[in-house]
Amino acid sequence: MDEKQPSFIYKISKVISDFFNPLISLFIFFVYMSVREYSLKDALLYFLPILVIVIAPVISWIVWNVKTGRYTNMDVSNRVQRKTLYIFIAACVIAYIAYNYFKNGYIDFVMLFILILLFALQISNFFIKSSMHTAFNIFVAALFFVLSVKMGIFWLGIAILVGITRIILKRHTVQEVFMGAGIAFVVSFLYLYCNIQFQH
């Protein structure tokens, strides 16, 4: 008997979920911000260190761990496996924050709150496998919101869509998606509040 083929909704959900993973969503934001806020030279000076210190190492880490069998998949859906992922990402983010501070003399607020979000997700991971996809896309919506209200609202829609796809794909339960969303909303609110208080 033939195996049941995935439905159209499942296939679309997989495409959406794979594309809007945390790294790609953050990458899109950083490119958007760099182009919008800086000259080409300044954009490269801002974005390249993030690419080299955070994004590339994290992608390499995930790929290497999947290839060596330490991680089941690129999503790192396993709660136990996520512990090392959170630690590695946090180490990369801390390295970037330190680099930026010593080079430019200020703490990168965006990266600081990414670190806070990571710590919150890591703590929640002891109790429930919060949806990282949902959490990061909600936080990215907050990041966009600072630059453009329309983009923020648009990305919040994407975040909701991503949360739904995580449930359809059975990567997370409804509770796990809501937990990720809840954590992200709290961190996003704090980010927006601090951005208003200290950045302007």
Image (spheres, rainbow, N blue to C red):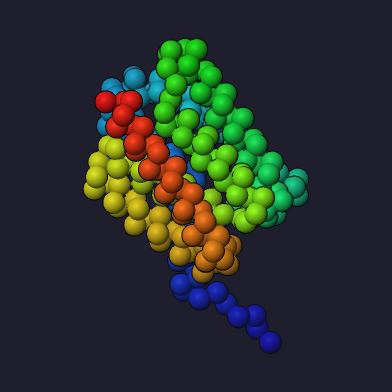
Compare residues 188 and 9 and report the one nearer the observer: 188
Residue 120, image x and y in percent?
55, 43
Q: Residue at x 34, y 50 (%)?
A: 155
Q: Is residue 99 left or right of residue 151?
A: right
Q: Is residue 121 left or right of residue 111?
A: right
Q: Residue at x 65, y 42 (%)?
A: 85
Tell me: residue 141, above or below residue 176.
Answer: above
Q: Is residue 32 visible?
A: no
Residue 124, image x and y in percent?
60, 49
Quadrant including the N terminus = bottom right
Compare residues 14 and 163 and report the one nearer the observer: 163
Q: Residue at x 61, y 44 (%)?
A: 122
Q: Is residue 12 left or right of residue 6?
A: left
Q: Residue at x 65, y 83 (%)?
A: 2
Residue 73, image x and y in percent?
65, 54
Compare residues 125 and 9 and report the one nearer the observer: 125
Residue farthest to the bottom, as pictured:
1
* Residue 43 placement: quadrant: top left
Quadrant including the C terminus = top left
Tell me: residue 107, above or below residue 127.
Answer: above
Residue 132, image x and y in percent?
53, 50
Q: Is residue 38 visible?
A: yes
* Residue 4 placement: quadrant: bottom right
